[in-house]
Each structure stands twice: as C-alpha cells, then as structure tokens.
C-alpha cells in the first residue's frame, strides 16, 4: 500500500429502495485520497456525489444500503479499517467518525440545533471523542472560533445559531468538523447557499485549515470553478460512475470525456467578454432505476457510437493517474 494513501474506495455500490423501484445511486466508484491533498468530486445534481460521501461515512437513510465494494481508511498507525463492514452504530465506527473522519454538510440551518449555543454544539463533538474537562473544551473551542475569524470568540461561544449569518453558520459547521483535528474532512457542497463573496471566504478558510492541520479533504461540488481554485485531483462523476479522474492540470488542460468537456464549457469566464455564449448539456440525466446497457451519457453525447448504446465503456488509462471511462479512448470503441 502506498504510504501516501489515506482513503481507498474500491468498486463502491449503493442502492436505494423507493417504493417498488431500486435506484442505483453509486455504481462501481473507485478512487484514492492522498494524505494532505484535496480531491474534488464534481458533477451535476443527482449524479451520486453526496451519496458517495454519505456511503463513506455510513450515514445513509434507512432505504439506502451499500451493496458492494470496500471503503478502506488507513489510520495514523497504517492500520486499515474497512468502514463499510462496521455496523453503523458500532463503537469502532463512532470512534472514527467525527474524530478521524469528519463531514461538513451543505445546509447549516438543518444541521445546527436552534436550542443549543454554538459553543455547546462544537464542544459536544470534542468531549465525545476526547477525555477532557469542560474548561479545556471551552478553551479549545474558543481557540478554534478565533482561528475561523470570529471576533470576541469567548462571547460568541454562548450565542445561538439564529444570531449568525449564513456564512458564519457555515464556519460553525467547519469548527464542529475540525475541532478534533481529523485526518479526513468531507465537505458536501459547503458553499451552495452562500453568495459569491462569502463562498470565496469559506473556500479560502478551508484551504487554510487544510494546510495548517494537514487534513486530507474531499470537496463535493457541482462548480468546476471552485474545483479549479482549490483541488489537487478531480473525480468527474455521472450517474454514479466516475467517468474521468486526474490531477487538476489533466482535467482542465486536457479533458477527455465528453461530459467533462461539457461541464468545463458551461463555466463562465470573465475574460471571455460578452460575445461568447455559455454552452449547456442537452437532455436530462436518466432515471436511476432504469437498467442501462451501455453508456449512461450516450443520449446526451455528440460522439455516440453504436457500442455506446449496447455495452458499458471500459476504463482507459490516458497518462499516469489520468483515466477515462469512454469508448472513444478504447480500441473496442474506435473499431466498433
């Protein structure tokens, strides 16, 4: 095992039962997270980004289940923990989740309890995982609030969520996730409900925290612009499958998959002037409960061949870690 790898996801599969239908939300997702780096998982809404994150953390609702694959977490001693094999309420998983692997959820309004002070909510996670006194917890929380840019943190400790703006609530969520100095931070659309200025502040703050604490981060977003500013590697996901994976330069300078190219063309560029029109991806994402024989992107792709509609594409290695799931880059596709 490469010593740099801290999280390894192998052929992860997650399904949901919705009435009589089975929705295939995550289909054979595989990737590795390197220590101290930020991995962006990007794609349209409903493509399986958040479900992948919730599957790693075993935070799926009752109608969801992991039906295949492995999620391996390597702790500070190099010991491998197969997270999906733990019972969701087991002591082992509770020890790891929140302390060694933390998550920032996309809606702080739904995640913060309105009847408790923000200080008590942050210190709850700390005292759950570390044997420290209330005074020590208070000092740690105040220090974290100061690090996150709160003025008068000793006073703000006793404020309630309604006393804060959306951006400050999201900082509280970062504090809850970071208070135990986790090895891995999963940020699920952390800036979705925020305006552009606050988004930039939150992303700058997350990058600073990552560098200061050496945290390995998974950033889930639909915004390619955010990925370009913050991430080291990128996984482009479509209908529960990673269709392209590579480092930042590979994905943005030499994108291979038609879906990746379409996402990049839909990003506004300030220097392009008013003459260049943004492109859009035609059609809609398929129903996740349908069994698709070929490539799920075939109906929306300009390069669709006969094989694309009849057979799942095979992953091709383009250059080093750069890989793509598309028949255009496989001899079987080119010769079809």
Image: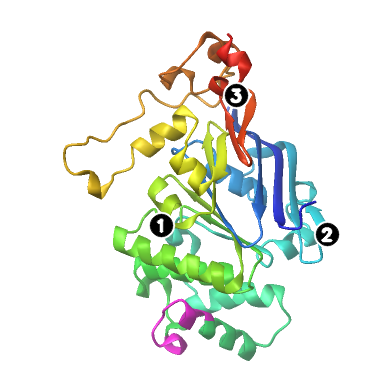
Quarter occupied by residue 123: bottom right
Rounded to the nearest whole Å, what is the CA distance between mark 2 and mark 1? Answer: 33 Å
Q: Nearer the viewer, mark 2 or mark 3?
A: 2
Which residue was labeled with disc 1?
191
Say whether disc 2 or disc 3 marks the residue closer to the N-terminus: 3
Crowd rating for badge 1 (residues with CA inside 10 Å; few <14, some 14–19, many 20+): many
Q: Which residues are magenta?
A: 144-155
Contact? badges 2 and 3 (CB < 8 Å): no
Say whether disc 1 or disc 3 marks the residue closer to the N-terminus: 3
Q: Nearer the viewer, mark 1 or mark 3?
A: 1
x, y percent for residue 83: 75, 51
Q: Judging from the image, what secondary structure is the residue with disc 2 in?
A: loop
Question: Which labelled disc corresponds to residue 128?
Answer: none
Which residue was labeled with disc 2?
79
Q: Judging from the image, what secondary structure is the residue with disc 1 in?
A: loop
Rounded to the nearest whole Å, what is the CA distance between mark 2 and mark 3? Answer: 40 Å
Which residue was labeled with disc 3?
20
Up-down: is 59 above or below 156? above
The verdict on residue 196 being magenta is: no
Q: Which one is nearer the viewer's eye here, 61 or 45?
A: 45
Q: Which one is nearer the viewer's eye here, 237 or 15?
A: 237
Q: Judging from the image, what secondary structure is the residue with disc 3 in?
A: loop
Q: Which one is nearer the viewer's eye here, 178 or 110?
A: 178
x, y percent for residue 311: 61, 14
Up-down: is 172 above or below 283? below
The verdict on residue 154 being magenta is: yes
| Residue 150 visible in image | yes
Crowd rating for badge 2 (residues with CA inside 10 Å; few <14, some 14–19, many 20+): few
x, y percent for residue 191: 40, 57
Q: Nearer the viewer, mark 2 or mark 1?
A: 2
Question: How many numbered circles are shown?
Answer: 3
């Amino acid at each position: 095992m490469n010593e740099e790898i801290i999280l390894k996801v192998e052929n992860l599969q997650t399904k949901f039962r919705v009435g009589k239908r089975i929705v295939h939300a995550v289909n054979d997702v595989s990737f590795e997270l390197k220590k101290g780096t930020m991995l962006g998982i990007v794609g349209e809404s409903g493509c399986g980004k958040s479900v992948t994150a919730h599957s790693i953390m075993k935070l799926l609702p009752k109608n969801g289940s992991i039906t295949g694959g492995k999620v391996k977490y390597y702790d500070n001693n190099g010991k491998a923990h197969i997270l999906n094999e733990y019972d969701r309420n087991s002591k082992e998983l509770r020890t790891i989740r929140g302390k060694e692997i933390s998550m920032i959820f996309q809606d702080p309004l739904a995640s913060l309890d309105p009847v408790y002070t923000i200080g008590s909510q942050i210190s709850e996670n700390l005292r759950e995982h570390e044997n420290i006194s209330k005074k020590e917890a208070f000092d740690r929380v105040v220090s974290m609030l100061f690090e996150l840019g709160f003025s008068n943190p000793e006073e703000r400790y006793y404020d309630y969520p309604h006393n804060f703006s959306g951006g400050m609530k999201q900082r509280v969520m970062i504090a809850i996730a970071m208070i135990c100095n986790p090895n891995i931070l999963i940020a699920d659309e952390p800036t979705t409900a925020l305006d552009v200025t606050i988004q930039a502040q939150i992303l700058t703050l997350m990058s600073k925290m990552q560098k200061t604490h050496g945290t390995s981060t998974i950033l889930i977003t639909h915004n390619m612009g955010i990925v370009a500013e913050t991430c080291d590697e990128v996984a482009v996901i479509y209908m529960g499958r990673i269709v392209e994976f590579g480092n930042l330069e590979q994905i943005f300078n030499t994108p291979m998959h038609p879906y990746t190219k379409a996402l990049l063309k839909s990003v506004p560029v300030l220097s392009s002037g008013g003459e260049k029109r943004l492109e859009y991806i035609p059609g809609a994402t398929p129903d996740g409960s349908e069994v698709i024989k070929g490539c799920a992107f075939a109906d929306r792709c300009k390069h669709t061949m006969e094989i694309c509609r009849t057979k799942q594409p095979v992953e091709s290695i383009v250059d080093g870690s750069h890989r793509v799931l598309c028949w255009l880059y496989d001899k079987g596709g080119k010769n079809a």
